[in-house]
Image (tube, helix red, strand yellow):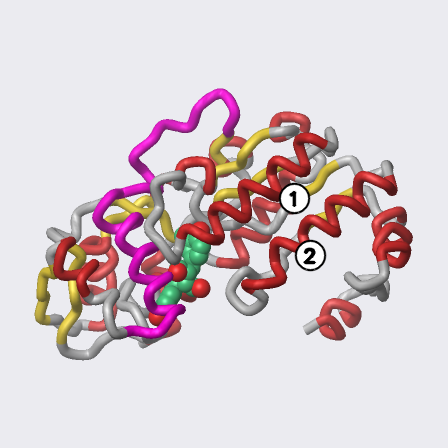
Amino acid sequence: MLLSFKKQGAHLVKASFSDHKSLVEAVKKVDVVICTISGVHFRSHNLLMQLKLVEAVKEAGNVKRFLPSEFGMDPSKMGHALEPGRESFDQKMVVRKAIEEANIPYTYVSANCFAGYFVGNLSQLGTLTPPTDTVYLYGDGNVKAVFMDEDDVATYTIKTIDDPRTLNKTLYLRPPENILSQRQLVEMWEKLSGATLEKTSISGEQFLASMNDVDYATKVGIGHFYHIFYEGCLTNFEIGKDGEEASNLYPEVKYTRMDEYLKIYI
Ligand code: GO6
């Protein structure tokens, strides 16, 4: 992946999290730092590494904008989140605190549901492709979520890095046509594929009870899906004065609609 970036003209710089000086030197070469370190694959190290990066950015002193690795739900709205999924929100808040205490200029990107994890599978857990017979609906399936093509997340992220309107703010990706309920997503797929799926509703209690007897990653997933599809945590608040909405700031971006995105699964 890194070499493919190089092919497209990116200048790769070597640095190591176990070598503070090398991090500072790397950071000194750039105006903007966008951190995309995974919380899934490096769960135990994500916090430590991001704090080391914040430390390097602070010492380097030249960075005009820092974007920590967030790109999901807004962690500042997840203080009530269920264990064990809440860990990543708590850690993101620790990183935010370090950034703000160091007076580093920042933008937080709340990208909501990456399509690869939430759309191709019609938001079914444990699979990444559409179900063929039965689709499980969370409750009545009518709670609104926000679905984003990952390339559009990148496009909006790059737009924001030198935009004074997003300095020290959260950029929420909520393009109006991608604010959809799970039921609307399923209907899009049925229309596209010509298939009719049997719909089985799962109650919130039933869904939470399924957290017993599953592996750690699934427990995390169940908690997150619960907040998104039962509670509506992505859409149950208005964007306040500390936030901006991406499609509103950048109307020129032709974001991918989810019926278009779903075509690859036919
Ligand atoms: C994505 C997932 C999909 C989990 C967020 C288990 C943090 C966020 C929308 O890593 O747990 O099957 O905001 O079996 O702030 C994972 C998590 C989704 C992907 C949710 C996420 C979303 C993390 C699964 C599964 C498709």
Could you tell me residue 10's position as x and y percent?
Answer: 80, 62
Quadrant hosting ligand 1: bottom left
- Is residue 145 visible in the rendered structure shown here? yes
Left or right: where 134 falls relative to 109: left
Q: Does the magenta stretch include residue 127?
A: no
Task: For label 1, count other residues whose C-alpha is less than 10 Å away and answer few (under 14), some (14-19) or many (20+).
Answer: many
Q: Between residues 149 and 94, which one lies in front from this camera angle?
A: 94
- Is residue 115 visible in the rendered structure shown here? no
Looking at the picture, does residue 173 appear above or below residue 15?
Answer: above
Determine which of the numbered discs, if any, sits on residue 67 in the image: 1
Upstream in sequence: badge 1 or badge 2 = 2
Looking at the picture, does residue 42 appear above or below residue 257?
Answer: below
Q: Residue at x 54, y 63 (%)?
A: 43
Left or right: where 180 falls relative to 206: right
Reading the image, the residue beneath label 2 is: 49
* CA distance separating discs 1 and 2: 14 Å
For disc 2, does the CB lie below 8 Å from ligand 1? no
For disc 1, does the CB lie below 8 Å from ligand 1? no
Query: For the view shown, which residue lies furthest in the bottom direction?
Result: 132
Q: Which residue is drawn at 36% across and 54% down?
A: 83
Left or right: where 158 falls relative to 255: right
Q: Residue at x 61, y 35 (%)?
A: 97
Q: What SS does tag 1 mark? A: strand
Q: Does the magenta stretch include residue 220?
A: yes
Looking at the picture, does residue 124 appear above or below residue 181?
Answer: below
Q: What SS does tag 2 mark? A: helix
Q: In which quarter of the image is the N terminus?
A: bottom right
Q: Where does the magenta region start and end?
A: 214-243
Residues tagged 1 and 2 counted as in contact (Cβ below 8 A): no
Give, as a three-letter code, the residue at label 2: Met
Could you tell me residue 169's position as x and y percent?
Answer: 58, 30
